[in-house]
Amino acid sequence: MVVRGAILWLAVAVAAATLGTAGASASSVQHRRAALALTGLERGVLADINSFRSEHGLVPLRLSAQLTDAARQHSHEMAADGYFAHNSYDGLVFWKRIQHYYSSGMFGFWSVGENLLWSSPSVTASGALELWEHSPEHLANLLAPRWREIGISAVHVGAAPGIYKGMPVTIVTADFGVRR
């Protein structure tokens, strides 16, 4: 959608899959690696999402290195290839893209969801949360009680190609997940 004063596109998708294959969960070392590598904007988005969830009686989300890697890959791909969508540039559906990083492993239940936005020239953490709060699909992801983990990516590009028309943009990807 176009918002007065700034171009802003929002998109959301939620997918669930129940799978029963072998694999391993993320280690605490990976969680610390992801946390240490977050930018200020990414840390702010994570803090604001967890605060918002707590205000609504929901558990805070743990930072996942695997979901953060999936989110970063997607944000960078969208910025480099000049598109904005949940599916990858080659058409791979979002949940399969995320599954590459966030394995369903030996878990009996596996589910992922994604919130996206882009803004020109930039967005704050509170601005991202506010925009998602005003979108029913995004809000549903923020308030889904099933989520336990999250990955965050915020990428700023000075002159992005394609649909961004050479403008400076900030692309934010939030990948939500649960495995049990």
Image: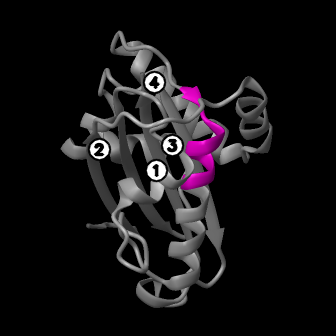
Residue of label 2: 138
Where is residue 171 shown, x and y percent of the image? 52, 63
Residue of label 3: 103
User: Callout 2, which amino acid?
Assistant: His
Residue of label 4: 148
Q: Alpha carbon of mark 3 to alpha carbon of mark 4: how far? A: 15 Å
Main secondary-structure element of the magenta-colored stretch:
helix
Circle 4 SS class: loop
Q: Which residues are magenta?
A: 62-70
User: Callout 4, which amino acid?
Assistant: Arg
| Sequence-earlier tag: 2 or 4 | 2
Give the colour scheme shown. Answer: one colour
Residue of label 1: 99
| Sequence-earlier tag: 4 or 1 | 1
Circle 3 SS class: loop
View extreme (left): residue: 136
